[in-house]
Amino acid sequence: PRKIIIDTDPGQDDAVAILLALASPELEVLGITCVAGNVPLPLTAKNARVVCELAGRGDIKVFAGCDRPLVRPLVTAEYVHGKTGLDGIALPEPAMALQPGHAVDFLIETLRREPAGTVTLCPLGPLTNIATALQKAPDIAPKIAEIVLMGGAYFEVGNTTPAAEFNIHVDPQAAEIVFHSGVPLVVLPLDATHQVLTNRARIEAFRGLGTPVGHAVASWTDFFERFDMEKYGSEGAPLHDPCVIAYLLEPGLFEGRHINVEIETVSELTMGMTVADWWRVTDREPNAYFVGRANAEGFYALLTERLARL
Ligand code: BDR
Ligand code: CA
């Protein structure tokens, strides 16, 4: 199986992404590193363990990482995810412990230990942990197989400010480090994730699994949906973060371009914007595979089939 580390700030959609990874034999989750984002670090570090236990995987290593962005003050998103970050269903307090040590050190040690090009990083939140690891240990950059992340937007512009997507907006300085790291990058921006919307039939398919996992995913997506439908008047809610894992499992569900993507870190007005050279109007070197299309039917079929295994 392909070795991955999930870096995350759960979040209902992060939670579904974690479940999708744990349900998939093609992937070996070496660890989960938590970061402050949707909610503060103590909650993301707890929520990740709640999700592992829901999947019956109390053996997964979960680490707490950075509790705030590199430079800017932390901005959270309880207005989307609820007070706990995982509102929608009450789940038991986790019995499994957090691993000792900092998430950043786990990232560095794992990448140094494993053969070069065998570990893929899957960031689903602000890029603070990943950027801190790259800064502290630049030798790990050439050892990373690939970074497949959820963040940014181009045609779909911002969901947090008119110009910026949440994950990049929360820590633009970290994003800039990652986008300039030279590591092969795959970016699942809002352009892709806004094409995989929940609807009644898709949520009922989760519930219809008749398992605790199916029930939890249906409850989370029900909760998550109300926000997007009220705010954007959209059909349902985008399951952003599971796109990262679905891309690893079935890249054919997605279509993008190798292009240059720069991060705005100066202008307050457009802070955290991903300036994506989709039409290749500059001669800046491509540094990312930026996904613009996603196959929603295929995505939900894959997700539901995998969740049924848990
Ligand atoms: C991203 O922000 C968070 O609210 C979600 O978990 C996702 O990672 C979408 O902009
Ligand atoms: Ca997230």
Image: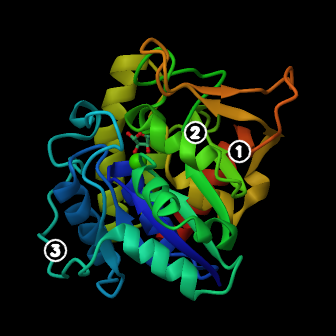
The outermost residue toward the left is 93
Q: Amino acid at mark 2?
A: Thr
User: Which of the pair 129/250 is nearer the observer?
Assistant: 129
Q: Is mark 2 within 8 Å of ligand 1?
A: yes
Quadrant of the rendered image containing residue 291: top right
Instruction: Work out whether residue 210 can be spotted.
Output: no
Q: Residue at point 48% right, 22% down?
A: 234
Q: Is residue 295 left or right of residue 179?
A: right
Q: Nearer the viewer, mark 2 or mark 1?
A: 2
Residue situated in front as seen by the camera: 209 or 58: 58
Q: Which quarter of the figure has residue 275?
A: top right
Local packing at callout 2 (Cα closer than 10 Å; few below 14, some 14-19, many 20+) is many
* Disc 2, SS: helix
Q: Which residue is mark 1?
A: 295
On the image, the x and y values in percent for residue 237 come to 44, 35
Q: CA distance from mark 2 to mark 3?
A: 30 Å
- Residue 45 higher or lower than 59, as above or below: above
